Amino acid sequence: MAYGFNHAEARLSFQAAQRLDPTCAICFWGDALVLGPNINAPMDAAAVAPALAALEKAQAAAGRASDREQALIEALSARYSADPAADRAGMDAAYAAAMQAVSERFPVDLDIATLYAEALMDLSPWSYWEDEGRTPKGRTAEIVGTLERVLAADPDHIGAIHFYIHAVEASPPRNRPAQVDRRPRRKTRR
């Protein structure tokens, strides 16, 4: 649900999982993740306190989490601050840098790579191309390359498919090896 930008429903699912296992660190991480900014919406000031509360619970439970989960929780801590004057762009950039480090640490984890690409997309929402879609702006080449790597390994990765469509939709269709926007889909497993 989070990969499909249905953050409200994703949050309900993470909260249901928390009720089933109150020690599930990644369940609290997911709750905090979906409260953050995305390419469709900036960070809502009302979401800061619940995001921080969920992140604190994730951090408290992180001792029982896997190395990957601990790395994701640590990276997400760069995205939020209790200081209302904190620089949102700076926190988003710090989160993207932290996710890059996590992606480099776990290079075969396709979900981590996809989350890294999303973090980069959040740095310049809907502004990935110039020159009528011919020239990538900023970190667009890195976004597209990361998502294409994920799709080469798993052509049905629902998050990579969705983010890739948005990353390239303003560019001409040439040289898009994934062609995900015209593929029939199997039922998702994510």
Image (tube, rainbow, N blue to C red):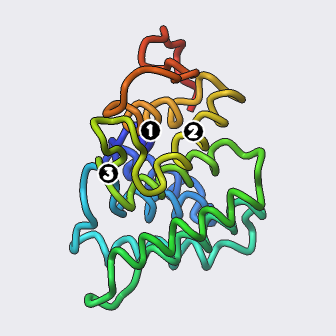
**Residue at the spot of label 3:** 39
Among the two numbered marks 1 and 3 on one chain, the one whose residue lies closer to the N terminus: 3
For the point 42% across and 52% down, the residue is: 121
**Residue at the spot of label 2:** 147
Residue 156 on image: x %, y %: 59, 23
For the point 51% across and 77% down, the residue is: 78
The crowd level at tag 2 (other Cα within 10 Å; few <14, some 14-19, many 20+) is many
**Residue at the spot of label 1:** 163
Q: Where 41 falls versus 182 (above or below)?
A: below
Q: Secondary structure at mark 3?
A: loop
For the point 49% across and 20% down, the residue is: 180
Q: State the CA–CA distance, disc 2 to disc 1.
A: 8 Å
Dots 2, 1 in contact, CB < 8 A: yes
Residue 182 on image: x %, y %: 43, 12
For the point 23% across and 67% down, the residue is: 44
**Kind of residue at badge 1:** Phe
Q: Quadrant of residue 36?
A: bottom left
